[in-house]
Amino acid sequence: MLFILFLCVQAVCGQAKYVFYFIGDGMGVNQINATEVYLSALKGGGRGSASLLFTSFPSATFSTTYSANNDVTDSAAAGTALATGNKTNNNYLGVTPENEPIETIAEKAKKAGKKVGIASTVPVNHATPGAFYGHQKSRSMYYEISQDLIKSGFDFFGGASFYNRDKKYDGSKAPDIFPLIEQAGYKLAKGYADYKADGGKSAKLILLPEKWDTPDAIPYAIDRKENDLTLKQITEAAIETLMKDNKKGFFVMLEGGRIDWSAHGNDGATTIREIIDFDEAIAVAYEFYKKHPKETLIVITADHDTGGITAGRGSLNISCLQYQKQSQDELTKALAAMVKSKNGKASWEDVKDVLGERMGFWKDVRINWENEKILRDAYESTIARNREISDENLYSTNSLLAAKAKEILNDIARLGWATGSHSGGYVPVFAIGVGQEQFTHKMDNTDIPKKIEKIAKY
């Protein structure tokens, strides 16, 4: 009788043959809300008239993110929690606080005969992707993490090249990791066109941007050029690669890694565009789900909140963010290029032209005298004196003028930021598909992989 009941439960609950695990790095609940307010403002259909695809998924809740040694986690500890179901110390990757390796959900999936993919918009050996195959005491042990990648034998990787390709953690020279990866049987696809030219023939694939030899992140969505690799393309390539000659299913983790990077810089418009871009990648998985609804599970969460964003001070004017045409990083480059073209003698009017074109100032966005004074003072203290004053955040160094321009647009939009670092705020959890009912009520980040493992029976 108990056996019959077990079979009935199995039939109702099913088993997730295909698992998509999306992680928006740094994507707190308020950032998602700000993005939907922005989309509604642009749509013009009134408040709440537009939403992201993933927020419409039937199961939704929130999660805590603290690490073993801090109320505010870093990506290594949070990635480890999301990959293993275990807490560890900040900076530790795939190991316990005692530095003992922990088996990850991806490794369990591989043992269960599934094909496995890990991808991000940042370097492949960065903290979050690395947490699914790496086991090192420091997230900065990039070369050693890359060696863990080779040992994993996973079927697909995607991202923005590798940090420290030929240098160990102690600074000593080491063999270039790329030949070692190829010797392990991986095809290195250098750009989406190169991948498509291969026709999906390779059983084991690593998809990198065309500029594969520079360990930078994939360009922000707001800065994207025609041939830039995207998370949407990576998701498409992952599905195609993992479905090849595959009867047992797959597990794939896909990270929107640059949400975090732009939030560290408190760049509101860029952060919102990154979340929209993340949603477009999820849409690819959703189309797959619609073809395999009884076998697929899609889970979306974040490793932590970055920035502590607040949307509104009594009211919002968020639609003005549409006039920001590039990230503050690229605005810094644009201003430098303009100054160079003027042989170091750029006028205030020259600066106004750049800010008008790239940020919409004076054209589409009204600039009052207080804001203009802030910009003019930044110009006078830097460009007018052929002097550099930098504004630094965790992932970039920008000119004072670009940073002030971003701050002013945030202020006009009435977006506030509590910090340039991580916060201890709740993060979202959304799910659709087999076992979606497991993702309700308040959770801890360690609960998420445990539930996926149960549903997928790893």
Image: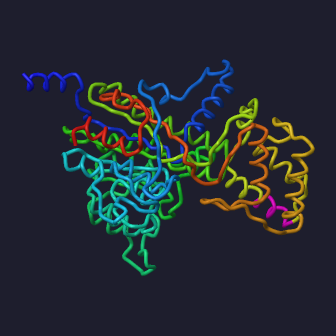
Q: Position of residue 19 (x, y in %)?
A: 32, 38
Question: Does 77 appear above or below 59?
Answer: below
The verdict on residue 380 being magenta is no
Question: Which of 189/40 is in front?
Answer: 40
- Asked whether, in this view, residue 137 is left or right of residue 265, the answer is left
The colour scheme used to paint the residues is rainbow
- Asked whether, in this view, residue 368 is left or right of residue 390, the answer is right
Question: Does 412 appear above or below 184?
Answer: above
Which quarter of the rendered picture does the C terminus lie within?
top left
- Asked whether, in this view, residue 380 is left or right of residue 192, the answer is right
Outermost residue toward the right? Answer: 369
Q: Position of residue 404 (x, y in %)?
A: 78, 52
Q: Main secondary structure of the magenta part?
A: helix
Q: Residue at x 64, y 42 (%)?
A: 309
Q: Position of residue 224 (x, y in %)?
A: 59, 46
Question: Does 141 appear above or below 73?
Answer: below
Q: How many marks?
A: 0
Quarter occupied by residue 133: bottom left
Which portion, as a residue range, is magenta? 336-344
- Asked whether, in this view, residue 178 is left or right of residue 55, the answer is left
Quarter occupied by residue 142: bottom left
Which quarter of the rendered picture does the N terminus lie within?
top left
Outermost residue toward the top? Answer: 45
Q: Position of residue 72 (x, y in %)?
A: 53, 53
Quarter occupied by residue 399: bottom right
Question: Which of 383/209 is in front?
Answer: 383
Q: Residue at x 61, y 20 (%)?
A: 49
